[in-house]
Every structure is written in C-alpha cells, then in structure tokens.
Amino acid sequence: MRNLTTTPAWAALTKHASEQADITLNQRFTADADRFEKYQLSAPSWFLDYSKNHINDEIMSGLLALAESQKVSAKLASMFNGDVVNPTEGRAALHSALRYQGSDPIKVGGRDVMPDVRSVLKQMEAFAEKVRSGTWLGFSGKRITDVVNIGIGGSDLGPLMATEALKPFAHEALSLHFVSNVDGSHMVSTLKKVDPETTLFIVASKTFTTIETITNATTARDWFLDSKASDADVAKHFVALSTNAENVSAFGIDTDNMFEFWDWVGGRYSLWSAIGLPLMLSIGPDAFNRFLTGAADMDEHTKSAPLGSNMPVVLALLTVWYSNFKGACTHLIAPYDQYLHRFPAYLQQLTMESNGKSVHIDGSDITVSTGPVVWGEPGTNGQHAYFQLLHQGTHLIPADFIVAAESCNPCGNHHELLIANCLAQTEALMKGKSTDEVVSDMKAAGVAEAKIDELKTHRTFAGNRPTNTLLTQRLDAYALGALIAMYEHKVFVEAAIWDINPFDQWGVELGKQLATTIYDDMSEAVKAGVSVSSHDSSTNGLINRINGMRHKLA
Ligand code: G6Q
C-alpha cells in the first residue's frame, strides 16, 4: 500500500483546503498587493502567471512538501538518466535524449544511445533537404508536392499538431496531409487531393502492426500502384518511420527508406524522433533543430530549477491541488493562437493516456483522483461556445491560457484584440460580477425595477475561477519545443506525485482485441448467413442489426 494520503504534507493540504475554502481569489488579491510578482515563473521562452489560483504561501509550501515527500526530484533524475521508469513494459522513457544538445553519453542498459540518435537525425536531415529542394523525384521525374503521413495516436497527433502550430514557417511548395482514422473517408478524401506522381507517403508506426495504419497504408499503396507506377516505384514514394524493420520490409518498403527509433521512445513522446519527419519536411532541418533545442532547454530547466521555481513542477502541483483537494475533474487548455488548434487534442493524449490510471506503479489501488479530463479549443472561438459554463456553470474548471505577445501574421489590430480577449477572460473568471454590480449597472442603464429583479441572478458571475497564463514572445519552433517539453514534464511530475506509471497504456488493449473478434464474428456470420450469439445481448443485437442493414444494402 502506498502512503500518499497519510503523508504529513497531504494532511496539511487537506487542512488548508478546508480552512481556506471560503477565501476568494478577489480577497487574496486584495490582501496581497504582490501576488503577481510572487506567483510567477520564467522558463525558456515562457513566462507563467499563476497568481490567479486558489493558493497562498502556506498552500504552496504544502504542495512543495508533497513533491518532496513523493521524491519528485529523484524520479525526474531517474527518467533523465535512462532508468527503467516504465516497469510494466520494462523500458526507459528517454525522449529527452532525442533532443539532448550536450556531449555526455546517455545510456540505456549501459549503451550510449546518442550516436544512434544523431545518425537518424542526420539521415532525416539529408532526406528532408532532398525533398524540400526538389531533388528527390517521383517515379515520373516530378518533384514531390504533397506528403501524406499515415499514422495514429502518438504517430499522428504530435507531428500533426506541431506541423499546424508552425505553419507560418512551412515550405511553400510542400503540402502536408495526415491520415489517421481507419474510417475510409479519411484516406479517400485525402487521396482526392493528391497526385501519385508527386506524393510521398510516410508510414509512421512504431510497431508497424497497428491495424488502422497498416490498413490505410495498404489502401495508399494500392491507389499508388493503380496509377502508372510500378512496384519498383514504391521506393520513391513510400518511407517508413518505425522500430520494426522486419514488418517494414514485409510491407514492401525498402529499409533504406526507413527512419528508425527505439523502444525507449514512447508513442506519445515520439515527436522528437523520426516520427517528427513530417514536421522537419515542413519547416526544414534548421527550424526542426531549434524545436529540439527549445525542448532541450526546457529539460535543463526541469532538471536544475528548484522545485518552487520549476515550471512543470509548479503546474503539476496546481493540478494535484485542484484534482485532489478542490474536487476538479477536468482541465481546460485555451490556446489563444489559431495555429495551436490541435494542441488540446495533443495534450489530451499526453495527459489522459499517461495519467488515466487507477493503480499505483506497484499495482496497488489508488484512493485519490488521478489525471483530469483535458479539453479545449483555441480562443477566441471557445468564448462563443463553452465559456458560458466556465463563467456560470457549477463545475470548478482550472484552465491554462496560452498566448504570444507577437503574432506570426501581424494584421491590423487582430493580435491586440486576441490578447485583450485572453486577458479579459482570465480577469472575468477570477473577478466575476456581483449581484450588487449587476443591479447598479442595470439601474444606470434605466432598466425597470421589476426587470432588474427578474434578471439580476441570471446576470451575476460568481467569479473565483482559477487560471494560469502562459506567455511567450512569438510561437516559433523554439517556443513550441519548450512548451511541449514543459507539458511532458508536468504530466510526469503529476504521475510522480500519484506514484503511477505514466508511460504505459494498457487501457487501450481490450478494445483492440474485441474489435478483432467482432470483425471476425461479423464477417463469419455474413458468410454463413447466421446470427451472432457469442457476445452479450446488446453487442449481439447491434452486430446482427448492422449485418442486416449492410446485407440489404449490398
Ligand atoms: C502512445 C500510444 C499510441 C500509439 C499508437 C500508434 O503513446 O502508444 O497512441 O502511438 O497506438 O502506435 P504505432 O506507432 O505502433 O502504430
């Protein structure tokens, strides 16, 4: 049994939560004029204002004591050191090695992995240069104009999010497409936009066994071979990103066109590896290296900053505070940056696949809430959709607001409006609007007494909603690398506190197994003209109904 909830730090935090439950954010700001100076942090490229949170020095000390009692520093060191921090899969989690800029060896099982890391990076750079410069030619001698990345989960969300985020720096003559869903519509609609003579397919799969990816890659290869291309031309149009050379070769891709990575790179942490090839193709090797450097600098910050001024640690502690002591179940990510429109989806996987666990690392049950539901959309769009619930709903929803001081596309007063909206939301969420203020505003506007009585509670904002604001100069490759690495480490620190393994994902296996069974059962039943009865009545009923509907359609 783990002793998280019996630590003195946990007891102290429980006491603070109960004793300070009624202190509002407004009261905290009134009582302490230095709150903004006190509760802010700087890390590479990013400034964090965390003053609009339900914290004071006592609570922060309690949270830091919790981090110490859960040995956060030692666990971080262990991860950076290449220890087996993923015991259920017997692996290290060394995504930090993929972006390491120093000259020290980084060892996994006694072997320095850095020569291999640098060699694949060189291979990627050489390839990217050829495609970007137009010297890599398709089978009919034309340059590549479109790149289709075929992958799912960790082999899709990271490169897709980052390619979108860094679009202002993209190669103008190269269009990137991402196909992930096994729903044929995803591949079919993408293939309609591209030409076999000028398209490069990247099959991105760590295991090279993932059904969605192999199905999509097979469809793409069939489509390609249905053109004037021959089998020998596949080498010019298909490359693989994988750890599984045997399956890559069996699929028909020359292993010379395979970019390798290793089992110590987790899927959702693989953007820095060969899985980042589409991003490198889009922004070029130099910008990709700045992306790696931003992340490496955030690694150094995480390794060396004291816990209290360590950005991922402080943000993780705030999540633990809200999840375990204030009853929050979700966490909003609100990037005020259109190019970060896939960032919440990316963080959903990073956070929810990592920390959606109910047992501790030793297999014993967890008695407290773990990873919150992460969600979000870019601002200002979210304001016109779900922000109503944030302001006047009944749930406590901590939020991260992310914004850059400068736009990558300066245009009129757009960026000033964007920033103003971002800051206005965090102010409104914190301050709210009292019924007295509502009444006096309505009186000043000449609203009749009866109407004021009818509407005043509807128009009252309780406020007291916590937010963090993350600010950077401009969202470039360096800043994005640093931001992603910061969230990776935040997730790790939360896991360290809850004492869970953030690097496995056994919860995704059962559905995959059952899908294979149902696929077989459905097709067998159609062939034999019988009903399926081997599942529960709901699943049987749905299978038989769908078989009936599809049979009639055929
Ligand atoms: C991520 C997960 C998962 C994985 C996909 C794709 O951490 O492991 O999302 O990335 O299932 O797996 P392959 O890259 O092996 O196809």
Image (spheres, grey):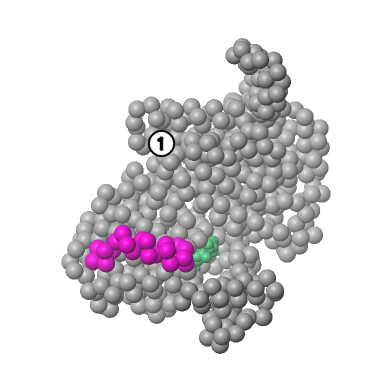
Quadrant for the N terminus, please: bottom right
Q: Tell me if the residue at label 1 has its CB under 8 Å from ligand 1.
A: no
Residue occupying the point 63% across, 33% down = 391
Residue occupying the point 39% across, 74% down = 218
Q: Residue furthest left?
A: 141
**Residue 420 location (% of width, % of height):** 48, 27
Q: Which residues are magenta?
A: 180-199
Residue 123, placed above or below residue 388: below
Q: Is residue 114 visible?
A: no
Question: Which amino acid, by three-letter code, is at mark 1?
Answer: Arg
Residue in the foreground of this view, choosing between 271 and 22: 22
Residue occupying the point 70% across, 38% down = 394
Residue 375, placed above or below residue 37: below
User: Which residue matches tag 1?
Assistant: 474
Q: Quadrant of residue 179?
A: bottom left
**Residue 248 location (% of width, % of height):** 40, 75
Residue occupying the point 54% across, 39% down = 385
Q: Is residue 168 visible?
A: yes
Q: How many marks?
A: 1
Residue 535, placed above or below residue 10: below
**Residue 215 location (% of width, % of height):** 44, 72
